[in-house]
Image (cartoon, helix red, strand yellow):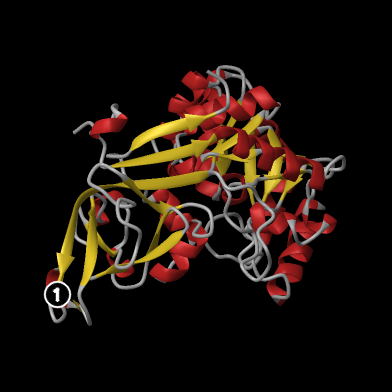
Amino acid sequence: MTPILATDAARAGAILTIDLDAVVANWRQLSHQVGPAARAAAVVKADAYGLGAERVGRALAAAGCSRFFVATLDEGMTLRRALPEAEIIVLSGPLPGCEEAFPADRLLPVLNAREQIDRWRGLADRKGRALPSVLHVDTGMSRLGLRYAEAESLAEDADCLAAVAPVLIMSHLACADDPDHPMNRRQLAAFQAARALFPGLPGSLSASSGIFLGRPWHADWCRPGAALYGLAPNGAKANPMAAVVRLDGRIIQVRDIDAGECVGYGSTHRAGHRGKLATVAVGYADGLFRTLGNKAVGQLGEHRVPLVGRVSMDLAVFDITGLPDGLAAPGGLLTLIGPGNDADAVAAAAGTIGYEILTALGQRYHRHYVGGTP
């Protein structure tokens, strides 16, 4: 079923504002931080972390970004239509039987296992030409990538290397958001050892948080994702990235509540005094997690207002007791993500990470893009 997109802001239960100029500013900041020795690509997987890969990709390409990473073949094929000239790399590599689609759309696969390498070489042999790719070596995450012994064996197979024609060797850091974690140096050493097997091949180790570990982790290419979209690279420090998203929910009803009355499923909130509530047309079907019940806050003007009761599928209730008359009214907007309450703060209240908040943003929102290319 095609997702129901809110094309009319006045009819939408919420408005998601995405600042493409802020995305570009974040990419430029990161590019400056790793340059000139290294360059910054852009990770736009999961529909640019829920913000729209085609719109984000075009804005970044116009700013000078030339290399993009996606997670799946379908993501790569979709992005290719928006970015006909960009280099697009598919992190999951080719699934069995899907190899032919990569050269057809000029997509580069990340080869994560020997069996992917063998299938990619088979396609190159059938086509009678080398087919570029990216090699992934596992340096300690135990998720994807070649073990050192497998990389060593590949390095000794000149015919195979010539067929799969690697343009980059990459790995992925497991603990980069914790600068003092010993895994960071262990993985750096393991990556350097793997790179030594392939002299002259450019390397890529760091995503967003790894960039802030310092120059040794930058290699030749960095792969920022979360930081592009305003998430903090290191939760223990002030966020250096520009805010990208704002979410405003539509108020459906304003109502009085008496002391002792309960709110929402399970009656998890009981009013301690007479007050006033605003019911907003956003729920867990829109990415406002159920775990935010009785924990999240919203914003009305300069006033922070608590979410009370459980989050429903389509609704959430906020306590607006004591606010000036008229500040909250049906049809008005209450800010759920915005200044002073960014995606990382919402994530902390939900007991998760900002990545999950962004990628869960619902399809029923009206999406309003600011800046970028037309």
Work out which quarter of the rendered image holds the N terminus and state it: top left
Camera-side residue of 67 and 28: 28
Residue situated furthest right in the rendering? 36
In the picture, measured across the screen, residue 69 lies left or right of residue 306, that is right
Picture quarter containing residue 263? bottom left
Q: Is residue 82 visible?
A: yes
- Residue found 49% across the figure and 59% down from its top: 341
Q: Position of residue 121 (x, y in %)?
A: 57, 34
Camera-side residue of 24 and 211: 24
Camera-side residue of 292 and 69: 292
**Against 325, is 119 above or below?**
above
In the picture, measured across the screen, residue 61 lies left or right of residue 50, that is right
The residue under label 1 is 258
Picture quarter containing residue 62? top right
Q: Position of residue 154 (x, y in %)?
A: 68, 47
**Against 319, is 128 above or below?**
above
Q: Position of residue 227 (x, y in %)?
A: 62, 50
Amino acid marked by disc 1: Asp
- Residue found 43% across the figure and 43% down from its top: 50
Q: Position of residue 113 (x, y in %)?
A: 54, 50
Q: How many marks?
A: 1
**Against 204, is 239 above or below?**
below
Crowding at mark 1 (Cα within 10 Å: few <14, some 14-19, many 20+):
few
- Residue found 70% across the figure and 53% down from its top: 205
* SS label for mark 1: loop
Picture quarter containing residue 129? top right
Q: Is residue 98 visible?
A: no
In the picture, measured across the screen, residue 183 lies left or right of residue 290, that is right
- Residue found 53% across the figure and 39% down from its top: 44
